[in-house]
Image (spheres, grey):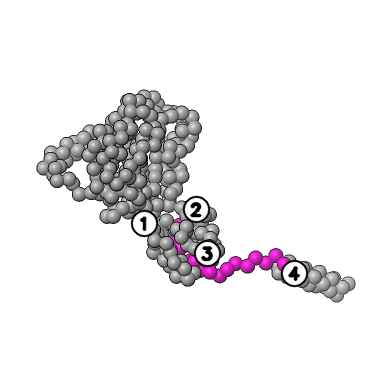
Amino acid sequence: MILIAILTLGGIGMAGSVLLYAASKKFEVYENPLIAEVQEALPAANCGGCGYPGCAGFAAACVNASSLDDLLCPVGGADVMNRVAAILGQNAAKTDPKIAVVRCNGNCQARPHVNRYDGARNCAVASALYGGETGCSYGCLGYGDCATACTFGAIHINPATGLPEVIEEKCTSCGACVKACPKNIIELRNKGPKSRRIYVSCVNKDKGGPARKACANACIGCSKCVKECPFDAIQMDSNVAWIDFRKCRLCRKCTLVCPTKAIHELNFPPRKEAATEAGGAKTKDIINEKTNSAC
């Protein structure tokens, strides 16, 4: 009886092994070994900024693509794409580094609160309920969904202004903050030579009077910047200006004519005409910064 039991169990085990082997061969999925090699060259951030579900998905897309022109790892940038291209024997498209910019300048002084929100401190929840605590329904809500979404610690809410601030050295242009913002005030733009950028820090689509009443720093759609730009890089869209970074030559003429200072210029040297006033202005800014309270 013992021998019969052993033979029976052995036969069942042998039959099961044969069936499992046959099934594994029938349903075998072949994976190109290049996918693992490309994935190894990626930064393993799994941020989704490339548009694919993690680095594994992006690696598979690169291997299966006939060209790398429309593929980019925002975290690794050109260096990583050049390594991927070398593995696949292709040429990587030249791309300019990008960075997130916050298109809202409605700080506590320019955009005072007119009500108080007592719900969940979450931008997505608050935006689904109402326009916000200020008169501007287009501006930043300040609850930090963008900061929570950023896995690199590159964006935070300034308690003095209530607005997000981007840390240039940490930003990888993954786009997580852009997707997290329900107000669409965060945009990826070219980082620019020497990190110099010019952009309109406003998305208010109201006409001049209501926009200025809601926020002293709002774009009022006067079109002075459009007329001043010699490179046709500025256009008006629904009462708000937008600067095309592909056409902008960083001449800074538009910033001088903007009546509300809604156009921002970053990382430029001080203008000659402003150099003599730098001392007094700097002292005044320090005093204002100390006296500014949280929103």
Which residue is drawn at the image coordinates 47% and 55% (left, top)? Answer: 50
Toward the viewer: 264 or 172?
Answer: 264
Part of the protein shown in magenta: 26-45
Report the Cα–Cα distance between label 3 and label 2.
Answer: 17 Å
Q: Count neighbours of disc 2 (C-alpha within 10 A) and say few if under 14, some if 14 to 19, many if 20 or more.
A: some
Report the Cα–Cα distance between label 4 and label 3.
Answer: 34 Å
Q: Which residue is mark 1?
A: 96
| Amino acid on which disc 3 is placed | Ser
Q: Nearer the viewer, mark 1 or mark 2?
A: 1
Quadrant where the C terminus sits is top left
Percent from the top left, x then y, of residue 197? 29, 48
Q: Count neighbours of disc 4 (C-alpha within 10 A) and say few if under 14, some if 14 to 19, many if 20 or more.
A: few
Which residue is drawn at the image coordinates 23% and 43% (left, top)? Answer: 253
Q: Which circle marks residue 252 in the picture?
A: none
Q: Which circle marks residue 22 in the picture?
A: 4
Q: Which residue is mark 3?
A: 66
Which residue is drawn at the image coordinates 29% and 52% (left, top)? Answer: 195
Q: Which circle marks residue 51 in the picture?
A: 2
